[in-house]
Amino acid sequence: MTDPRALFRTKRSNLERSARPARDNSSEGAGDDGLRRSSINRMHTPSQKLIEEKFVCLRCNECCRKPGYVYLTKGEEETIAGFLGVSVHEFVNASCELIDRRRLVLKKSSDESCIFLTPGGCSIHSAKPKQCRDFPLLWRTEKSFDYCEGLKKVFRDHA
Ligand code: SF4
Ligand code: SF4
């Protein structure tokens, strides 16, 4: 049987290979905002199957406030630019940075949150990058359990 923790480590390593993934990464995140809970017993982290069955996003938006980058994959700048009703050039100039000279990421606000995060949530929700859509079912780190309210609920209810 595949170890679910190995699964998400593999997915994480794919994203983190050249830099930190967007939403959860870094050394950072959760711990720095006081949410680190050393009391969580990692030995009992819910399985991938359980998370897939029980996880519900509780819209806390904590994943959009974490240090790290949201990488754009091929074609996503066109998708977001189209959603915003601007040209790709305008979108990239206003909302992206170039990392490692070749990878586009979404800009961050001074507090490290994504520039598309608003009090009402993600302002590009229906066009948001795959990296955002995949979290936390297809990738996450152990620290995700410290701040993601949906994961914390799975942990509380089922671990
Ligand atoms: S694009 Fe949206 S979902 Fe992704 S980090 Fe930014 S605000 Fe969050
Ligand atoms: S941290 Fe988890 S519960 Fe909160 S918005 Fe992100 S995916 Fe949803």
Image (tube, helix red, strand yellow):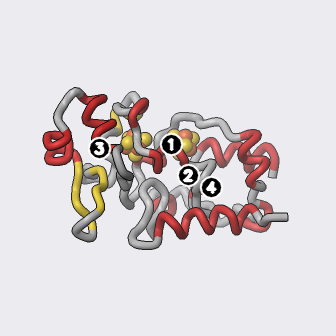
- The answer to whether the residue bearing label 2 lies less than 8 angstroms from the nearest atom of ligand 2 is yes
Residue at (64, 62) in percent of width and height: 8
Q: Left or right: 1 with respect to 53?
A: right
Q: Decide: marks 4, 1 in contact (CB < 8 A)?
A: no
- The answer to whether the residue bearing label 1 lies less than 8 angstroms from the nearest atom of ligand 1 is yes
Q: Amino acid at mark 4?
A: Phe
Tell me the tag on residue 147: 2
Q: Quick one: label 4, few (<14), some, or many (20+) residues within 10 Å?
A: many
Residue at (45, 54) in percent of width and height: 23
What residue did someone put label 4 on?
145
Tell me the tag on residue 133: 1
Give the number of the mark in front: 3 or 4. Answer: 3
Q: Left or right: 32 with respect to 4?
A: left
Residue 152 percent coordinates (x, y): 66, 48
Distance between the alpha carbons at the discs numbered 4 and 1 = 17 Å
Given the current orientation, which residue lies at the most extreme front position? 75
What residue did someone put label 3 on?
77
Residue at (46, 46) in percent of width and height: 130
